């Protein structure tokens, strides 16, 4: 597959993602980032490079804050989708009753 074909397919795939899927992907990526930063932090502390480990500590902190926000957004999207489905079901019932 040529790079242009890959990027074309990738772009089409991104357009078809739901917002909940996008947030889910962000959550998975953030977890990977947190794990990598923690490993780097442990290695730096074990080698005695404490001054750079301070920077990594705050980067981990910011990633965790972002993860919390993503989880909140994910839960809210599930609630909204549930409410939308309930409204759609109610509307279908009303239309069926009017047709009868």
Image (spheres, rainbow, N blue to C red):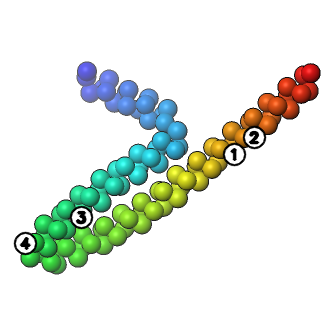
Q: Whole-Å distance between the Cαs marked 3 and 2?
A: 44 Å
Marks 3 and 1, the one that precedes in the sequence:
3
With 25 as the anchor, is 73 left or right in this view? right
What is the quadrant of residue 47 in the picture?
Answer: bottom left
Pointer 2 with pointer 1, Cβ within 8 A: yes
On screen, 13 above or below 63?
above
Q: Whole-Å distance between the Cαs marked 3 and 4?
A: 14 Å
Residue positioned 14% across, 73% down in the render: 45
| Residue 23 x %, y % | 47, 48
Q: Residues within 10 Å of mark 4 (few under 14, many from 20)?
A: few
| Residue 17 x %, y % | 49, 36
Residue positioned 34% across, 55% down in the render: 31
| Residue 38 x %, y % | 23, 64
Secondary structure of the residue carrying numbered label 1: helix
Q: Residue furthest bottom?
A: 51
Residue 87's disc is 2
Q: What residue is pinned by disc 3?
A: 38
Pointer 3 with pointer 4, Cβ within 8 A: no
Secondary structure of the residue carrying numbered label 4: loop
Residue 83's disc is 1
Q: What residue is pinned by disc 4?
A: 47
């Amino acid at each position: 597959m040529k790079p242009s074909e890959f990027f074309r397919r990738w772009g089409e795939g991104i357009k078809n993602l739901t917002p909940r899927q996008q947030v889910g992907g962000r959550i998975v990526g953030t977890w990977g980032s947190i794990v990598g930063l923690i490993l780097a932090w442990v290695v730096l502390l074990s080698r005695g490079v404490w001054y750079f480990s301070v920077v990594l500590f705050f980067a981990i902190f910011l990633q965790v804050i972002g993860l919390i926000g993503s989880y909140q957004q994910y839960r809210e999207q599930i609630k909204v989708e549930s409410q939308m489905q309930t409204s759609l079901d109610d509307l279908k019932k009303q239309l069926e009753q009017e047709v009868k």
